[in-house]
Amino acid sequence: MQLRHMGIIAPAISAREATPVLLPPRMGAGGDSEETVTTALPKPRPKTARPPMYKVLLLNDDFTPMEFVVLVLERFFHMPHARAVEVMLTVHRKGVAVVGVYTYEIAETKVAQVMEFARRHQHPLQCTMERE
Ligand code: TYC
């Protein structure tokens, strides 16, 4: 996995992101002038960086039984039954819905679990993820 591309490792500082600061005039031989020097220091950032988050999406199809989708939402997304029915109906009517937002690895695991569960039961249900 390329952590930098996933946004987990901060990119090297660039001039655009840096905060220009004025340094005092240089002293010493030939340096008594009023000249000031602008340089770039890293922008102060909070040390508690948040990881990039990923939406997990469930897609509609014409064949997967509604009860199966409700079961998926209860089992893998921990939704109470009434909420699972609502979300299933949203997917059924609109074609797609976000069913959860997670870090990369958790989202990847949810997608794999749903796809494997659907495959085992021979339903064409599709589950995908995208960066928030
Ligand atoms: N459209 C399906 C049906 O009428 C139900 C369904 C809902 C399928 C949500 C997939 O993600 C889905 N049986």
Image (spheres, grey):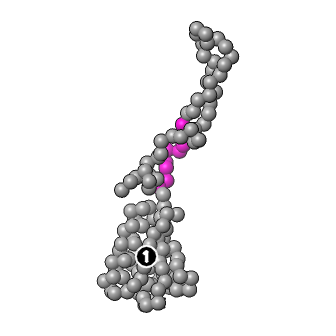
Furthest residue toward top: 29
Q: Say above or below: 17 vs 38.
A: below
Counting from the top left corner in percent of width and height, residue 44 is at 55, 39
Q: Say above or below: 22 vs 81.
A: above
Residue under label 1: 127
- Under circle 1, the secondary element is strand
Horizontal placement of 26 versus 98: left or right? right
Q: Say above or below: 71 vs 130.
A: below
Horizontal placement of 23 versus 96: left or right? right
Question: Could you tell me which residue is drawn at 67 percent across and 13 percent down?
Answer: 33
Furthest residue toward left: 120
Furthest residue toward right: 34
Q: Residues within 10 Å of mark 1 (few under 14, many from 20)?
A: many
Residue 83 shows up from this direction? no
Query: Can you say which quadrant of the picture contains the N terminus?
Result: bottom left
Front residue of 50 and 40: 40
Question: Could you tell me which residue is drawn at 42 percent across and 62 percent down?
Answer: 104
Question: Could you tell me which residue is drawn at 48 percent across and 57 percent down?
Answer: 52
Question: Could you tell me which residue is drawn at 33 percent across and 86 percent down?
Answer: 121
Q: Which residues are magenta?
A: 42-51
